[in-house]
Image (cartoon, helix red, strand yellow):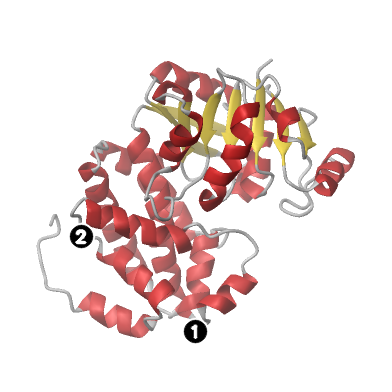
C-alpha cells in the first residue's frame, strides 16, 4: 500500500488526503496544531477547514513532521506558497531520500520570483525526476464532497507523473499526466491573479461581458508568459490552464475571487484581509508574477492592474478607465 505524507491540513490538503485514501493510499496528514490533529483523529472530521465532511479511515493526522515523513513514497506540500521555503527547510532532513515531492501550491515566491518546484529543488536538492505538480480546477469543498473533478499530474519524468496519477485516481477524481511542469505551475499561479481581477469586476457590479473578457484576456497574457518561459502553449488550453482559470474566476468557493469581490465593493486591503480566513495566493503572488513578466519582457496589463489596486491603492474605477483606454491592437498581440 502506498504511503503518502501530506504537509498542510487546510481545506485543500485535507480534501486531497481524502482523495489519496479513497484511491487506496495510507495518508499521514500533518498540521502544526496538535489539538487539531487530535480532533481529526478522534472525530474523523476537520472542523476548522472542512466541517461536516467525514474523513476515510486511511487518513491519520499528526503534528509531528517526522512521523508524517516516515516511509512516504510521495510527500505532498500544501502550505501557503510564501511559507514553503522556511517550512521545507525544517522538514527536508526528515524526508525519505527517494520520496517524490509533490506541489499542490499555486503561487510564485516573493523576492526570487521562483515557482514552487524551483523552491523545492533549491531547498532539497532533488532533481526534476523527483518533483511533481498537481494542478487543475480543484475547488476543495467540491472534491471533499466527492463531486466529479479532473486534474493534471505533471513531472518532467513521465513515469513519475503516471505513478502520481495512479496514487490519486478515484471514481470521482480523474488525473491526467503532463510533462510540462512550467506551464502547469504558471497556469495555477496566474489564474489566482486573474480571479482577483474578475472578483473586483463582480464587486463593482460589472456584467458577464466584462468578466468573460477578463478571463479570456487573462488566459492570453498567461500564455504569453508561459511561452516566454519555455512552457507548451497547449497546456494553457487544458485543465491546468483554462480549466483552473474558469473554476477559480467563476466560483464563490474561490478565495481569490471572493477577495477581489470585497475589494471591488470598496473594502480596503486591510479590511479584506481581516475577513479572509484562508490564504488568497494571488494577493502576494501578483507582485511576483509581474516581476516574472518584466524579467521576460512580457506585457501583462491585467496583472499590472491587479498589482495597482491591491498594493498601490489604485481605485478600481480609475484602474478600469486606464485599462479600457489602452491603445487598440490585434487580438493575437
- 295, 205: nearer the viewer: 295
Which element carries disc 2, helix, strand or loop?
Answer: loop
For the point 37% across and 50% down, the residue is 113
Residue under the image location 38 percent in, 84 percent down: 315
Point out which mark residue 299 bears. Answer: 2
Labelled pair 2, 1 in contact (Cβ < 8 Å)? no
- Residue 114 visible: yes
Residue beneath label 1, please? 266
Residue 218 x, y percent position in the rendering: 30, 58
Q: Which mark is residue 223?
A: none
In whole angstroms, how far apart are the C-alphas of marks 2 and 1?
28 Å
- Residue 247 in the image, given as x and y percentages of width and height: 47, 53
Picture layout, residue 169 above or below residue 207: above
Work out which quarter of the rendered image holds the C terminus and state it.
Answer: bottom left
**Residue at the location (36% across, 47% down)?**
242
Q: In terms of depth relative to the viewer, which is nearer, 261 or 300?
A: 300
Residue at image point 66% right, 30% down: 5
Q: x, y percentage for residue 200?
A: 43, 73
Front residue of 117 and 55: 117
202 in relation to 226, above or below: below
Provide residue 282's location: percent of width, then percent of height: 45, 59
In the rendered structure, the answer to whether residue 87 lies left or right of residue 127 reads right
Question: Which of the marked residues, 2 or 1, is nearer the chain's N terminus?
Answer: 1
Q: Crowding at label 1, few (<14), some or many (≥20) Cα neighbours within 10 Å?
A: some
> In which quarter of the view is residue 311 placed?
bottom left
Secondary structure under the numbered disc 1 in the rendered image: loop
Q: Where is residue 233, by image quadrant? A: top left
Q: Nearer the viewer, mark 2 or mark 1?
A: 2
> Which image quarter: residue 14?
top right
Amino acid at each position: 500500500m502506498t504511503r503518502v505524507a501530506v504537509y498542510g491540513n487546510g481545506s485543500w490538503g485535507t480534501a486531497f488526503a481524502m482523495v489519496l485514501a479513497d484511491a487506496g493510499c495510507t495518508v499521514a496528514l500533518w498540521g502544526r496544531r496538535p489539538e487539531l490533529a487530535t480532533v481529526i483523529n478522534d472525530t474523523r472530521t476537520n472542523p476548522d477547514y472542512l466541517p461536516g465532511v467525514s474523513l476515510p479511515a486511511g487518513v491519520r493526522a499528526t503534528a509531528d513532521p517526522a512521523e508524517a515523513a516516515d516511509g512516504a513514497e510521495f510527500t505532498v506540500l500544501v502550505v501557503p506558497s510564501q511559507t514553503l521555503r522556511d517550512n521545507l527547510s525544517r522538514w527536508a532532513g526528515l524526508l525519505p531520500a527517494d520520496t517524490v515531492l509533490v506541489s499542490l501550491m499555486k503561487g510564485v515566491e516573493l523576492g526570487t520570483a521562483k515557482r514552487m518546484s524551483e523552491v523545492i529543488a533549491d531547498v532539497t536538492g532533488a532533481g526534476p525526476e523527483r518533483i511533481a505538480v498537481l494542478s487543475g480546477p480543484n475547488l476543495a469543498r467540491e472534491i471533499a464532497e466527492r463531486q466529479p473533478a479532473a486534474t493534471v499530474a505533471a513531472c518532467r519524468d513521465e513515469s513519475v507523473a503516471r505513478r502520481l496519477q495512479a496514487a490519486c485516481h478515484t471514481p470521482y477524481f480523474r488525473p491526467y499526466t503532463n510533462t510540462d511542469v512550467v506551464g502547469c505551475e504558471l497556469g495555477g499561479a496566474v489564474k489566482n491573479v486573474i480571479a482577483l481581477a474578475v472578483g473586483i469586476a463582480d464587486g463593482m457590479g460589472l456584467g458577464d461581458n466584462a468578466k468573460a473578457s477578463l478571463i479570456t484576456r487573462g488566459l492570453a497574457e498567461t500564455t504569453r508568459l508561459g511561452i516566454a518561459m519555455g512552457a507548451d502553449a497547449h497546456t494553457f488550453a487544458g485543465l491546468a490552464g483554462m480549466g483552473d482559470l474558469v473554476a477559480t474566476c467563476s466560483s464563490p468557493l474561490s478565495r481569490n475571487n471572493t477577495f477581489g469581490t470585497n475589494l471591488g465593493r470598496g473594502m480596503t486591503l486591510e479590511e479584506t484581509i481581516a475577513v479572509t480566513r484562508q490564504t488568497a495566493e494571488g494577493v502576494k503572488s501578483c507582485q511576483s508574477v509581474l516581476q516574472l513578466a518584466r524579467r521576460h519582457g512580457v506585457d501583462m496589463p491585467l496583472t499590472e492592474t491587479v498589482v495597482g489596486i491591491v498594493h498601490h491603492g489604485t481605485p478600481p474605477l480609475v484602474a478600469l478607465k486606464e485599462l479600457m483606454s489602452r491603445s487598440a491592437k490585434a487580438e493575437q498581440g
